[in-house]
DNA sequence: GCCAACGTTGGC
DNA sequence: GCCAACGTTGGC
């Protein structure tokens, strides 16, 4: 799941009292379908920082509530307001995610791009702008093996 | 249903 | 700030 750290980053999730946040504001059908149809309670997700330096995977979160209507779509004062989404026929959904842990280091997009093991990863597909994307278990495991402490310069 | 115009995302 | 790669909108 992508988020801009300037808007809502892994530190924001960690510092919530419950460490839980509703993932609202998704206004893309493919991303919505991913949340609504594929995300189940207990599923783990990578937390990805976009639009920052460097963009990359920074942590892990867990789905703690499955898809339910996104109320920000009903609020005219919200920047994600969508008048075509009605409370009795909601168009947009969100899930709740809970902080699990930060990675030991940021695994940068530029690094992920260099790994033949990650060929086909949705994040790396050309032109992809989806904010929520699937990760195959094999690739999930592989990415975790990259999460090792970096040696400090002496 | 087509498609031009426009808006958004997000890496660079 | 640029711009590629989308997705959306709306006239026809």
Image (cartoon, coloured by chain):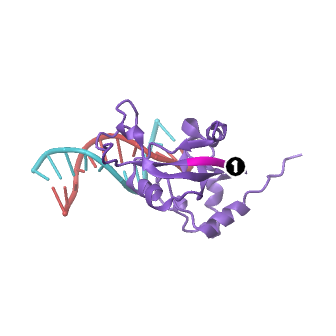
Chain colours: A purple, B red, C cyan
Measuring from the top left, give residue A76's x and y in whole percent: 34, 32
The residue at which mark 1 appears reads as: A101
Looking at the image, residue A4 sits to the left or right of residue A89; the answer is right
Residue nearer the viewer, A123 or C5: A123
Q: Give the residue drawn at x 85%, y 47%.
A: A153
Magenta region includes residue A63:
no
Magenta region includes residue A101:
yes
Q: Give the residue drawn at x 64%, y 62%.
A: A114
Measuring from the top left, give residue A50's x and y in whole percent: 56, 46
Q: Which element is circle 1 on?
A: strand
Looking at the image, residue A100 sits to the left or right of residue A8; the answer is right
Span highlighted in magenta in the image: A97-102
Q: Is residue A130 at least partly visible in the picture?
A: yes
Measuring from the top left, give residue A106's x and y in whole percent: 69, 49
Please rate how many residues cluster around mark 1, counting C-alpha atoms within 10 Å: few if below 14, some from 14 to 19, many from 20. some
Residue nearer the viewer, A151 or A77: A77
Q: Main secondary structure of the magenta part?
A: strand
Q: Is residue A52 at least partly visible in the picture?
A: no
The residue furthest right is: A154
Where is A148 relative to A77, above or below?
below
Residue nearer the viewer, A60 or A121: A60
The residue furthest front is: A88
Measuring from the top left, give residue A26's x and y in whole percent: 44, 47
Residue nearer the viewer, A34 or A51: A34
Looking at the image, residue A114 sits to the left or right of residue A122; the answer is right
Where is A112 relative to A106, above or below?
below
Q: Give the residue drawn at x 48%, y 61%.
A: A38
Callout count:
1
| Mark 1 chain | A
């Amino acid at each position: 799941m992508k988020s801009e750290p300037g808007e809502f980053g892994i530190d924001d999730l960690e510092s919530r009292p419950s460490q839980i946040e509703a993932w609202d504001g998704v206004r893309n059908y493919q991303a919505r379908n991913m949340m609504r149809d594929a995300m189940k309670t207990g599923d783990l997700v990578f937390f990805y920082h976009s639009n920052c330096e460097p963009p990359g995977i920074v942590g892990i979160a867990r789905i703690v509530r499955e898809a339910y209507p996104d109320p920000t779509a009903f609020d005219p004062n919200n920047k994600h307001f969508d008048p075509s989404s009605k409370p009795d026929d909601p168009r947009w959904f969100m899930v709740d995610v809970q902080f699990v842990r930060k990675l030991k280091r940021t695994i940068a997009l530029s690094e992920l791009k260099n790994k033949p093991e990650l060929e086909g990863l949705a994040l790396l597909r050309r032109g992809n702008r989806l904010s929520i994307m699937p990760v195959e278990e094999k690739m999930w495991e592989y990415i975790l093996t990259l999460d090792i402490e970096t040696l400090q310069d002496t």
